[in-house]
Amino acid sequence: MLTKTVILPAIKREDAQVYNSLKFLIPEEANDDGTLTFMFIADPYLDEKNYDIFEVLVQQYGRARAEEYFDRWISCFAYEQEVISFR
């Protein structure tokens, strides 16, 4: 919910090109351990653009509110997140 109502709208306002390059994949079912795997895919990945979610939140909402949103977003993760780049 936070991704759709706060994070993606902030990215869209910050940089429409980045927003348009992103696909947000939502799982159809849970993993065996009950967790869900959500994925952001940048296609194409725009080298010169900023994909740092926290930085975008700071630009859109100010540092205090960005920290609040980011802490709420991070608290949803069951494990440390992985970033995988393919070129």
Image: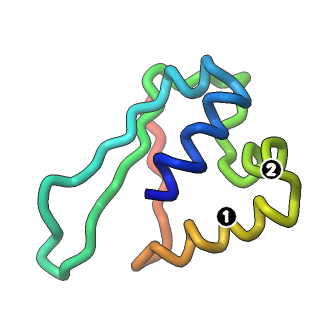
Name the residue tied to disc 2: 61
Please give left or right for residue 66 compared with residue 38 in the image. right
Badge 1 marks a residue whose secondary structure is helix
**Image x and y of residue 6, in percent:** 59, 50
**Image x and y of residue 37, in percent:** 29, 61
**Image x and y of residue 62, in percent:** 87, 53
Name the residue tied to disc 1: 69
Task: Give 18 or 1, whichever is nearer the viewer.
Answer: 1
Task: Give 45 or 69, whichever is nearer the viewer.
Answer: 69
Graded by Cα atoms within 10 Å as few (under 14), some (14 to 19) or many (20 or more), the crowding at tag 2 reads: some
**Badge 1 vs badge 2, beta-carbon distance below 8 Å:** yes
Residue shown at 71%/34% (left/top)? 50
Please give left or right for residue 49 compared with residue 85 in the image. right
Graded by Cα atoms within 10 Å as few (under 14), some (14 to 19) or many (20 or more), the crowding at tag 1 reads: many
Residue shown at 72%/22% (left/top)? 48
Q: Earlier in the sequence, mark 1 or mark 2?
A: 2
At label 2, which amino acid type do we have?
Tyr
At label 1, which amino acid type do we have?
Tyr
Q: CA distance from mark 1 to mark 2?
A: 9 Å
Rendering quarter of residue 32: bottom left
